[in-house]
Amino acid sequence: MVTFIRWLFRLTGAAIVLAMISVLTIYYLASRSLPDYNKRLRVSGLATPAEIVRDNANVPHIFAGTDADVYFGLGYAHAQDRLWQITTMRRTVQGRLSEVFGPRTIEIDKLMRRLDLYTLAQQSVQVQDARTQAALKAYADGINARLSEVNRDALGRGAPEMFLFNAPIAPWTPADSVALVKLMAVQLSGQLDTEVLRARTSLALPNPDRLPDILPDAPGAGVAALPSYASLMDSPLPRYAANTDRLRDPLSPFHGKELAGASNAWAADASRSASGGTLLANDPHLGFTAPAIWYLARMEFQDGGVIGATIPGIPMVLAGRSQDLGWAVTSSYMDDLDVYVEKLNPDNPEEYQTPDGFKPFATRKSIIEIKDEAPVTITLRWTENGPVLPGSHANLATITPPGHVASIAWTALSPRDTTLSAGVALMFAKTVQDGIAALEPYVAPSQNVTLVDGVQIAMKTVGAMPRRSANHQSQGRMPSPGWITSNRWQGRSAYAANPEFVQPRGGILGNTNNKTVDRPFPLHVSFDWGDTQRVQRWQRLMQSRQVHTRDSFIEAQLDTVSPAARTLLPLIGADLWFTGEAAPNGTQERQRQRALSLLAEWNGEMNEHMPEPLIYSAWIRALQTRLIQDELGPLSDEFTHVEPLFIERVYKNVDGAAIWCDVIQSAPRESCTDMARLALDDALLWIGEHYGTALESLRWGDAHQATHDHPVLGNVPLLRYFVNIRQSTSGGDFTLMRGKTSGKPDAPFLNVHGAGYRGVYDFADPDSSVFITSTGQSGHFLSRHYDDLGELWRRGEYIPMSLDADLARAAAVGVTHLIPRQE
């Protein structure tokens, strides 16, 4: 027995030692790729010495003798800190994820190959202006210099993820950067999903006239009634069809309409600024990841400095400022994509119908390599309208009759995409007028760009705007027959037709993805907008002061009051407040009374420490589910987020919308008060099961955690605790400090989408400007800069956004000197 115990101790000790050795070995290998920011390095491709000064937040300030060498330095810095990010994004747009991740990503690769964005990017390189082509080449040389250094000095393959998912890294090319701009268009677009959902809902509703209730238009002039989707098709379709969309992998760039791009931006001219200079604030909204997609950087060109938010892989500041000009971006929600249903030739499925008869598809074979499996060959097919997409994507199969396929026309599919040239030109603009002119070549993704110089403010919608026929059958709101001439695009509208606002009378302008113009179709810009709620709060905050300051703009960025809650609670609770007999503790009636009492005294602030936001959110979510389930059946699961305008229409009985309160399948006639009470009981039951029955002790932040998750390692046991960044957060779907919830049944209120970047610029004193990102500059989870900005971001704090070189050097964490190699 003693011998057994002795050997047990020995084996246990050996196992512990082996485990420690393994951990230390893994740590050593992973730590090899931690960048050294203090060094001198000789590199090829550089004409003059370059200096990368990293301030105490690890923001690189890049100085060199030529502009090309500044871009080289940016490429090197991006590759130092975000090599895994840029190579994974490149694989995504190329449709080559499966070479690394195996069958898991095959459907993503198939779809990206069908869109053929990388081929289009390669074709677009040649149409960039000379300055942009030079920038692209120098930037690629900077990335490749880092790759050469990693290979030469065995620097842990450049990123710790490379040990788990090892694959050769090809040199970076100018086409790669152009392709990443097109990938941005994929991530920001929700038009395809919106069209398909509108068609499916039209088919599912017993009364198609109720379509404007559940999918309402933004307030403004009405839109003429659309035909039902079924009437557009020449073949019958089922009322309900099973969900076929399977692309919801964290690596997928297809996020659906609810999680497409959003943003806030607002500006004030000197007449509305306490400092006498113009002000600009911006917080673009994207899905949260670790690290954040944004990377802060400063580039010192011969013409002056530029500082702001970049996306690794793209050589430009997408949101930021120079000494003379500031620019902010928000998603415009321009309708720049149409879905077409193409009729196949019944005698030859390789042909499709056009206005001139049947024509063959343009086809090409494409081979997808899959890790540890045989490669797959797919046939890419294009029509005159655009690429043919699989029925599994975005539920296209559910709205495509037998004998037909679906294709899309989309501005991002241009082979002459000069968006990067526009972005590079903007960095050198000096005035608002220069900025507007610089953005004319911009193609996709469409954005509202708010511009501020020292005197003026302006906002311009940029991006190619399709020109449609006034006789378009669905006005681009639902899929339409692709063989009918009037449904097809008729070119591109002139840049001057894009909405433009310069120096408004009130001295303030802004955009929260709200409706910006009310023009009749086909000059409408869009029918579907990203916000009808946040703009109400923004207007109130902007008009509550005669003059604004940098701090009042920050206060607005961080505002967490929900206008939707303030509007909806008095409607749905009108007949429930302070009614009913006193009920004993432990009863459902008493729990309901406690919840209503809390909500009655609540001002709509979605504060992470309060219980009311959770009670309200659960109630309104349960209410929408009860209202739509009987009419939409299985399709109700697609409505993952609350639509405030729908609830408002129902409870105000707009055009008879209160009929949604009656359950079709039941004999009694339910009132809207009945539905509100039942939904509140549903919500309290759900809260009790997940967070407990002590309502006063609930915290919204426990449910509304920001999920900065690593898209690859985030689900790996144990490792996820090192790579994922979770934070209790305030805000919600409809607050200016937007914290978009997931809408998933198991965790519907996780904060998955919001302002990964915030910046506020004061042109009375430009160096007092501030900015922040939601995680940190480094993509290496062993680096202290992986999450060091995240806690500041959560608390609503910022770091200086200065172009003062001495200030950057004063507390630098490192200075990298890049020296030209003598060839």
Image (spheres, rainbow, N blue to C red):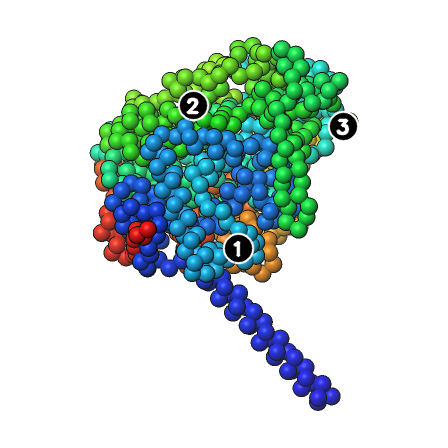
Residue under label 2: 516
Indicate left or right for 693 with 539 as reference.
right
Q: Nearer the viewer, residue 415 or 36?
A: 415
Quick one: label 1 or label 3, which is nearer the N terminus?
Answer: 1
Q: Amino acid at mark 2?
A: Thr
Q: Secondary structure at mark 3?
A: loop
Residue under label 3: 665
Q: Amino acid at mark 1?
A: Met
Indicate left or right for 793 with 1 as reference.
left
Q: Are marks 3 and 2 in contact (CB under 8 Å)?
A: no
Residue 457's disc is: none
Q: For the residues carrying marks 3 and 2, which lies nearer the camera in this image?
A: 2
Examine the rendered structure and indicate whether residue 207 appears above or below residue 737: above
Q: Quadrant location of residue 551?
A: top left
Q: Residues within 10 Å of mark 1 (few under 14, many from 20)?
A: some
Q: Nearer the viewer, residue 408 or 137?
A: 137
Residue 162's disc is: 1
Where's residue 537, x and y in %? 42, 33
**Distance from Cα at disc 1 to Cα at disc 3:** 56 Å
